[in-house]
Amino acid sequence: MSFNLTAARYGKDKVRVFRVVKNGNWHEVVEYNVCTLLEGDIETSFTKADNTVVVATDSIKNITYYLAKTSPHILHPERFALHLGSHIVGKYAHIHKATVSIEQLRWHRIAINGQDHTHSFYRDGDDKRTTEVEVDATAGKDNMVAKVTSGIADLLVIKTTGSAFENFVRDEYTTLAEVTDRIFSTSVDLRYSFIPKTLDPNNLGNFDYDKVASAARAITLEIFATDESASVQATLYKMAERLLAEHGDVEHVAYTLPNKHYLAVDMKYIGIDNLTPSAAEVFCPVAAPSGLISATVSRK
Ligand SMILES: O=c1[nH]c(=O)c2[nH]c(=O)[nH]c2[nH]1
């Protein structure tokens, strides 16, 4: 019997980087979790125990820290990922592709009496800004191309009204009641990709990824809060439509939204109505199962 290696990549995951940029006493900070995976002429490392083609994952970690120190792009995750990916692909002749994924953790500047503090920050949310950048030199080191997919992970939201779910299929399997008013909670996972013409890894300053990132978060929160939701599906679509409509550089928008159920507690045991929607005030958040609604919206 003979076999083929049909796909292979390797690298370093969860490289934790905290970087301070000091302009006098005015400090900027970022914290990233970086994953860098390489592809290329590395088959023999799998099939023939040939480590001569292996750039050690420890070295990949060291390159990440080297560029965290020296890259002018460090404060901008997409640009830093493009720099890191193109640096590695440019340096090693036999490495043709690098995929750099970054999660940015939130550090928000503390304000004292309305005045931004110069060097103190707090964690103002567990959501992460994400980016996945693929730098591809398959067509030659002078013809590198890149794909950038950015997004949001773990943005936990809840609304206590303005959400209904009616007119769904009713048959012998249906136990769910139609509701005109319910809690809607989800943990937003968003990914949006950019139209490729903006993605030259050698011209990293040419696009304002940060602007799209803050708009994506603001749009997601605004539509979630203000939509009279007919379903998770319908609200998801409105979020995606708005991001595409307002950002011509965005090509595809994909949301994955769990429907995190909150069940009104039945208090008939003590003679209290907590079940009719207008009386429902005490809920049990249910960790599992949850609904899971996912869609990609693109331009026609
Ligand atoms: O917004 C919803 N979409 C569904 O598909 C669904 N299914 C369900 O049981 N509750 C909900 N809510």
Image (spheres, grey):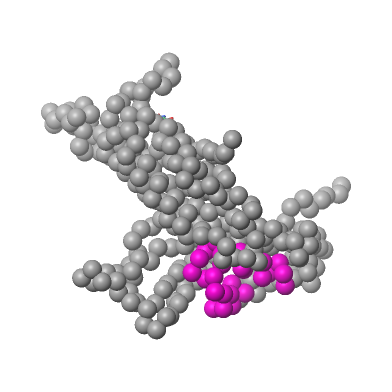
Residue at 62% in and 65% down: 203
Q: Which residues are magenta?
A: 63-91
Residue 261 image position (x, y, % from top left): 35, 37
Residue 207 image position (x, y, % from top left): 55, 60
Asked whether the viewer can see residue 235, the reply is yes
Q: How many marks?
A: 0
- Asked where in the image residue 175 lies, by quadrant, the reply is top left
Residue at 54% in and 78% down: 69
Residue at 86% in and 49% down: 2
Ligand 1 in which quarter: top left
Residue 190 versus residue 215: which sits nearer the camera? Answer: 215
- Asked where in the image residue 24 lies, by quadrant, the reply is bottom left
Q: Residue furthest left?
A: 271
Q: Report whether 56 appears left or right of 100.
A: right
Residue at 32% in and 74% down: 120
Residue 4 image position (x, y, % from top left): 82, 51
In which quadrant will I find the C terminus? top right
Residue 243 versus residue 110: which sits nearer the camera? Answer: 243
Residue 228 image position (x, y, % from top left): 32, 33
The majority secondary structure of the magenta stretch comes to helix
